[in-house]
Image (cartoon, helix red, strand yellow):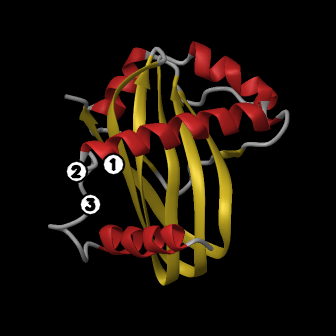
Amino acid sequence: MKASQIAALVLGAACSAGVLPLTGCSTTPSSQADRDALRDRAEATIGEFKRRDAGMERFFSSAHGYAVFPEIGKGAVGVGGAYGRGVVFERGAFIGYCDVSQGSVGLQLGGQAFRQVIFFQSQAAFDQFKGGQFAFSANASAVAADAGASAAVDYRDGVAVFTMTTAGLMYEASIGGQRFTFDRAE
């Protein structure tokens, strides 16, 4: 596991557990260099999803909006947390930044880093996300991005989610959910 992934796991767990409520967990990266780097990693993530499954192009081209998380770090020993920053696109154009945090309890151990893309089929679903009224419950599911996987996927309640594991191993039988925030770009 890379040092950046381990750092993301620790930061994710701390942010989700509320350990760092006043520091380090801002939705928009603080410097222009960090904002540019996040956007570059998001574009690379989009390319990787399309390379892994050419059918993903239909989601990128038809979705009203989508959020791309180049890296979400997740870690747990009984109590777990995850955190990641992402980039938001509307009709294919960059409009802002987002983040995801997750807390969970249950039988779980390990650390994992993964990428995630969330597609919003309609303006209404996308507006819920941008308005901070969007969260995944514990029973929400995502599709592992792999060759041909997108062919069998359709939107559920106006949302489709794809993930790609990048590192780590996680044993988990837990209850938790993901929560998102959005900041419009200046």
- What's the mark number on residue 62? none
Q: Dots 1 and 3: beta carbons under 8 Å?
A: no
Residue 63's place in the image compared with 86, above or below, is above
Cα distance between the residues tagged 1 and 2: 7 Å
> Which amino acid, by three-letter code, is at mark 3?
Cys
Q: Dots 2 and 3: beta carbons under 8 Å?
A: no
Mark 2 falls on what kind of element? loop
Q: Residues within 10 Å of mark 2 (few under 14, many from 20)?
A: few
Q: Give the residue at the far right of this rendering.
A: 148
Q: Position of residue 13 (x, y in %)?
A: 40, 73
Kindly identify the residue that appears in the image at 53 percent across and 68 percent down.
Answer: 5
Residue 125's place in the image compared with 28, above or below, is above
Q: Label 1: which residue?
A: 34
Q: Label 2: which residue?
A: 30
Q: Quadrant of residue 60?
A: top right
Cα distance between the residues tagged 1 and 3: 14 Å
> Which amino acid, by three-letter code, is at mark 1?
Asp
| Sequence-first disc among 1 and 3 | 3
Q: Label 3: which residue?
A: 25
